[in-house]
Image: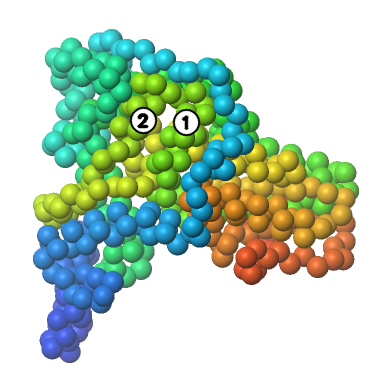
Amino acid sequence: MRSSKRNYYSKLLEGNKSNIKNTWRILNDVIKKGSGTNSLPNIFLTKDNQEIYQSKEIANEFNKYFTEIGPNLAKDISNTKLDADAVSKITNLDKTIFIQGTNENEVITVVKTFKSKKSADLHGFDMSVVKEIIEIIAKPLTHICNQSLQSGRFPERMKVAKVIPIYKAGDKHDFSNYRPISILSQFSKILETIFHKRLYDFIEHHDILSEQQYGFRRDRTTSLAIVDLVEKISDAIDNKQYAVGVFLDLTKAFDTVNHDLLIKKLCRYGIRGVAYDWIKSYLDNRFQYVHINNTDSQLLTVTTGIPQGSVLGPLLFVLYINDICLVSKTLHFILFADDTNVSFGKDLIKMDKVEKEIHALKCWFNLNKLTLNLNKTTFIIFTNRAITVDTHLKINNTEIERVNEITFLGVTIEKVKLETAY
């Protein structure tokens, strides 16, 4: 067997000795057999179809590609002014958050809740090391945290992310077939967790988040979201109605969040004063670099999006999209972070009304610099009645695919099973 493999690769190399690109691909195919699924090839192609070989060049190209994802998507969205229209429907809360300081006991408790991961940040620390020394550094770390919370300034050295490219699928020589995994400062995670607790308690106390939002909330699970969806469908079927479920697909939603619009919304929700300054500082002047093959890329600025791998990011995202439920009084929303389902139950199917509602959502996404991928958005019609009308759904001249089943939050929703069950 080994002899056959050796002969096979020898012939391949001999036949491609004049083609350096193919030679590298063959060698990488041999090497990767014993080096895990995330081994990087030694040659990559830029978007100009140029071959690059040096680790520094490859790292720089990776970083350029990753940092441009959000801005490029936002650029493709039709120009919409980020003015009062984007936040005008949000009720201006008459309460303002007050951020309390922390103490050594809280800092130590927070650190102990983290998993002992071995991924080193840009300073060379991993969480397992921090957990070992936390009793020693608790006092100065508490002082740093309190200085930050009181001044409304997030430490600059905590704003740099170390990014590792992880292979997804397809051609390994193509940058677009990798996803970024960000490793933030271990100390950033501690400070974020302390702030997150205060922000989350304020939000829940004042019922700021929509009841339809199930993502990143205590006592809210994907199971409850699925139950909500199934109940709405079954109610429609029991009442001899038609239920149209539209499953919206957002492209890189976390990467395209507009910082200016986010903080305007937060202000409406009562995040003002020092807390407002702190979050603005947290989002401003963030940088990242890519680390591959013991080589670091140059630093690049991150201008859009929620910091990946952050503690605070998911909560900021659900606040960012919270007002989507104000777009329609007809649709029933089920939100789990960027997974969005809307359902529409009526005695008669009127696809023109469904189109009108989805078009209004599309306008909201545009206004909020989020990309609705119409080609991956699908819909299902649930009913026990005969469908005798045209059921085509078209948004912006794009035909939305009608399907009989969909995977939503990891659960397959099947039209036939639901219809026969009720």
Most foreground residue, 294 or 326: 326
In the drawing, does residue 20 fall left or right of residue 243?
left
Q: Is residue 388 above or below residue 21?
A: above
Q: Position of residue 168 (x, y in %)?
A: 35, 59
Q: Quadrant of residue 249?
A: bottom right
- Dividing the picture into quarters, in which one does residue 276 lie? top left
**Left or right: where does residue 261 sit relative to residue 149?**
right
Crowding around mark 2 (Cα neighbors within 10 Å: few <14, some 14 to 19, many 20+) is many
Residue at 29 percent of width and 68 percent of height? 174
Q: Amino acid at mark 1?
A: Leu
- Residue 246 is labelled as none
- Disc 2 on helix, strand or loop? helix
Q: Which mark is residue 279?
A: 2
Image position, residue 362 (x, y; %): 60, 54
Residue under the image location 22 percent in, 51 percent down: 300
Which amino acid is tagged 2? Ile
The residue that appears at 45% across and 38% down in the rendered structure is: 262
Percent x, y for residue 364?
58, 49
**47 left or right, relative to 43:** right
**On screen, 148 above or below 410?**
above
In this view, the residue in front, 351 or 97, is 97
Q: Residue 308 vs residue 26: left or right?
A: right
Position of 361 relative to 320 (above/below) = below
Q: Earlier in the sequence, mark 1 or mark 2?
A: 1
**Badge 1, how many Cα within 10 Å: few under 14, some, many 20+?**
many
- Are the residues flagged by discs 1 and 2 in contact, CB closer than 8 Å? yes
User: Which residue does the numbered mark 1 point to in the structure image?
Assistant: 266
Label tally:
2
Label 1 residue SS: helix
Gap between marks 1 and 2 measured at Cα:
9 Å
